[in-house]
């Protein structure tokens, strides 16, 4: 498999006609860094005369390094990997190079490509989606059948099912991440969107002090009584463990990297039992949260021609398939979610495609990281009983309004 995908990558790179030159690429570390190293190795094999330097950094370090470089226009990097929540800041500050039509060519899932666009810039695109992360909803079909419960379609259904399952004493009804900051916000947003609310409105004003947001938060807080004790400090490991061990019947937030091991008999007690779908919605359509990783070319890059060729190479169908097979990286191209080899390995790809097609990104504001931190603080205070839903949302509204107007 490795040789076959590498040969395909070599043929693909040759067709792009990239010129030889030095590329410096800034990337995440860990599994994303390993995947990027694979891409770099394939690219260099296809272009023996090219010189590519890959710099891997942890999430925070990557943000700080590329931000400093672009702000000071040092030209340190030709290609950067970025969290999609950083894109509004980078685009707004004119730190990225607009991509050509040729670079954008392909069957990218529209919702994943749109995140790299600039509003008010006539649809100019500045980043390509490389990692198709999307938050989904997990429910235990076996446990639901035991209690004659239908698949939950609304968040009210989730509460009812959680109560019924919890009362049986066999397992908790639901599990979620309750740690303040990004984890609890990520769990709350699909519920907020599912009630027709949002953190900011279309004019960019804070919009948390609304009946829709209050209903959403009250629903979220009600879930705690059907979860394990201490869920307010749960993070990803605890959610994964609860699902794999069969100690929770539902999870309101499940990411693609967590999914394969649910069917791994060496790790999971719920093999074949867990279903993964788009999140429920109380009103309107489900709104799964997108959490993409993108690649882009800094405006001060020294080698933009080869950088554009590398972007096209790294996000090609052939390379995305290789990354999915070898590293579990979820693609951002529609056709790959119907690929027989990939679907055979990842049986939930069709549901994952639906989630990506309906996906929604966090608010596209430049200081989202600060806003998310404040919202996460107040959500956790509500979850731990220090405030009720209305008080938490009023305080969050007041603070976030001030931050947005800075």
Image (tube, helix red, strand yellow):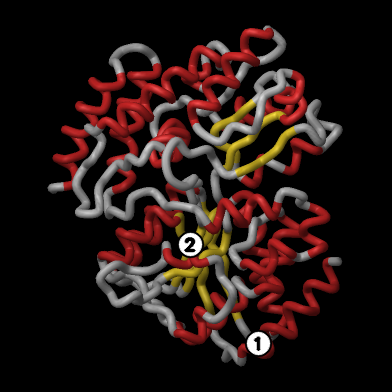
How packed mark 1 is, by other alpha carbons closer than 10 Å (few <14, some 14-19, many 20 or more), is few
Q: Which residue is found at the position 35% from the left and 76% from the top?
A: 124
Q: Which residue is found at the position 21% from the left and 38% from the top?
A: 400
Within the image, what quadrant is residue 40 found in?
Answer: bottom right
The x, y position of residue 49, in whole percent, is 65, 87
Left or right of 341 in this view: 127: left
Q: Quadrant of the N terminus?
A: bottom right
Left or right of 161 in this view: 263: right
The x, y position of residue 62, in whole percent, is 45, 54
Closer to viewer: mark 2 or mark 1: 2
**Residue 111's mark?**
2
**Label 2 vs label 1: CA separation?**
37 Å
Answer above or below: position of 330 versus 116: above
Report the residue marked by disc 1: 49
Within the image, what quadrant is residue 173 found in?
Answer: top right
Q: Nearer the viewer, residue 350 or 156?
A: 156
């Amino acid at each position: 498999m490795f040789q076959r995908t590498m040969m395909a990558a070599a043929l693909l790179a040759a067709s792009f006609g990239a010129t030889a030159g030095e590329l410096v690429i800034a990337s995440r570390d860990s599994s994303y860094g390993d995947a990027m190293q694979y891409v770099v190795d394939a690219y260099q094999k296809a272009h023996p005369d090219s010189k590519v330097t890959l710099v891997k950094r942890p999430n925070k370090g990557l943000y700080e390094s590329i931000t400093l470089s672009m702000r000071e226009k040092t030209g340190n990097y030709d290609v950067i990997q970025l969290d999609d929540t950083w894109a509004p800041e980078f685009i707004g500050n004119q730190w990225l190079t607009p991509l050509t039509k040729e670079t954008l060519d392909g069957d990218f899932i529209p919702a994943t490509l749109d995140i790299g666009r600039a509003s008010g810039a006539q649809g100019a695109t500045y980043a390509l989606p490389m990692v198709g992360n999307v938050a989904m909803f997990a429910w235990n079909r076996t446990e639901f059948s035991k209690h004659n419960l239908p698949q939950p379609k609304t968040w009210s259904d989730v509460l009812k099912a959680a109560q019924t399952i919890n009362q049986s004493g066999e397992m908790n009804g639901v599990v979620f991440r309750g740690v303040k900051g990004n984890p609890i916000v990520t769990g709350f947003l699909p519920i907020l969107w599912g009630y027709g609310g949002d953190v900011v409105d279309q004019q960019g004003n804070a919009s948390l002090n609304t009946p829709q947001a209050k209903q959403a938060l009250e629903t979220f807080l009600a879930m705690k009584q059907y979860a394990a004790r201490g869920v307010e400090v749960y993070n990803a490991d605890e959610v994964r463990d609860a699902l794999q061990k069969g100690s929770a019947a539902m999870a309101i937030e499940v990411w693609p990297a967590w999914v394969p091991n649910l069917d791994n008999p060496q790790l999971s007690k719920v093999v074949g039992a867990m279903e993964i779908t788009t999140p429920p919605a109380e009103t309107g359509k489900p709104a799964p949260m997108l959490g993409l990783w993108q690649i882009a070319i800094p405006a001060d890059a020294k080698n933009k021609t080869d950088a554009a060729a590398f972007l096209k190479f790294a996000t090609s169908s052939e390379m995305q398939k290789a990354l999915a097979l070898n590293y579990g990286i979820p693609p951002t191209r529609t056709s790959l979610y119907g690929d027989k080899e990939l679907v055979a390995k990842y049986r939930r790809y069709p549901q994952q495609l639906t989630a990506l097609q309906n996906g929604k990104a966090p608010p596209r504001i430049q200081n989202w990281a600060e806003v998310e931190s404040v919202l996460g603080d107040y959500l956790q205070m509500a979850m731990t009983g220090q405030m009720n839903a209305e008080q938490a949302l009023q305080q969050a509204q007041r603070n976030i309004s001030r931050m947005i107007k800075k």
